[in-house]
Image: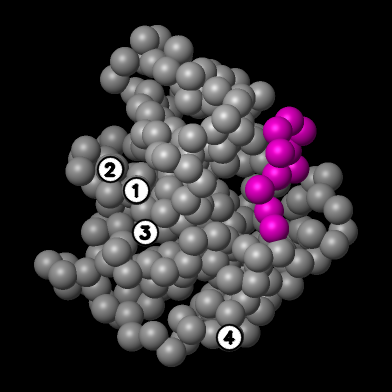
Amino acid sequence: MRKLVIIPTYRERENVSAMITKVFSLPEEFDILIIDDASPDGTADIVRSRQPEFPDRLFLLERPGKLGLGTAYITGFKWALEHGYDYIFEMDCDFSHNPDDLPRIYRTAVEGADVVIGSRYIQGVNVVNWPMRRLLMSFCASAYVRLITRMPVRDATAGFVCYSREVLQAIDLDRVRMKGYGFQIEMKYTAWRLGFRIREVSIIFMDRTAGISKMSSGIFGEAFWGVIGLRLRTIRPASGTSHSK
C-alpha cells in the first residue's frame, strides 16, 4: 500500500528539515509531499536541498502565495490520486502532530476505517501547552459541530487525518468550499454523509515550539458559519463514483 503524508508549509524553516528526517526514520514507509505557499524564509529551498537524499519519496509543490490551508490540501489530494496513493495523510509541519503516531493511524485504516482522525478529545483533553482560551475555543468548536451536524466525531477540527483513496475519489473536491479549519470539518462531514467509516485514535497534541502559528479568529469565524451551511447542503458522491449513505 502506498502512503503519502501531505504537509502544507508557510514559514516553517525551523521545522521542515527535522520533520522530513523524522518521517523517513519511521519503521513504516511513508512518502512526503510538501506544499509551500511561497514562504519568505526559504522553507522550499530547504526541502529542495533534501530531495536528492530521497529522490522517489520527497516531493515539493510550490504555490505563488498564501492561498489557504484547505486549497493546499485539495491540491495535495488531487496530486496523490493522480500518483496512485492508497492512503493519504494530513499533518502539520510544526510537530504538534507527532509523526510517531502515523503507523498507528495507518494500522487503524488498514483494519477497516475509511477516515482515521488523530483525536485530541476522545480520552479527556490531550493538549499540551495551549493557552486556556485557545483550548476552550477548539473544544467548544467540536461540541458545536456535533450539535449542529449530529456527526459522531469528538474532534471535528482535527488536522491529523488519514483518508483512504476511495474517500477522496468519492468526494467532489472541487465543491469543497471552506479554506481554513472549517475545511477540516467539511471534509469529515462529507465523508460521513457519504457513508464512510470514521474512527478516532487518541493522540497527544503538543503546541509548536518553533515557528509562527497561523491561527486567527477569522479561521474560526468561517468554521462557525460554514457548519450551518453544511446542514443545508445536498451531499452527493463525485461524478463516476457510487458510494453513498
> Which disc number belongs to residue 143?
none
Residue, disc 1: 75
Examine the rendered structure and indicate whether residue 231 appears above or below residue 192. below
| Amino acid carrying mark 2 in the image | Trp
Secondary element at tag 4: helix
| Amino acid carrying mark 4 in the image | Ile
Residue, disc 4: 148
Secondary element at tag 3: loop
Decide which of tag 3 and tag 2 comes sooner along the chain: 2
Residue, disc 3: 114
Q: Nearer the viewer, mark 3 or mark 2?
A: 2
Span colored in magenta: 206-216
Crowding at mark 1 (Cα within 10 Å: few <14, some 14-19, many 20+): some
Q: Nearer the viewer, mark 4 or mark 1?
A: 1
Asked if the magenta segment contains residue 135, the reply would be no
- In 3D space, how far apart are the residues under numbered discs 3 and 2 (Cα atoms)? 19 Å
Q: Position of residue 103 (x, y in %)?
A: 48, 36
Image quarter hosting the C terminus: bottom left
Q: Is residue 57 left or right of residue 17?
A: left
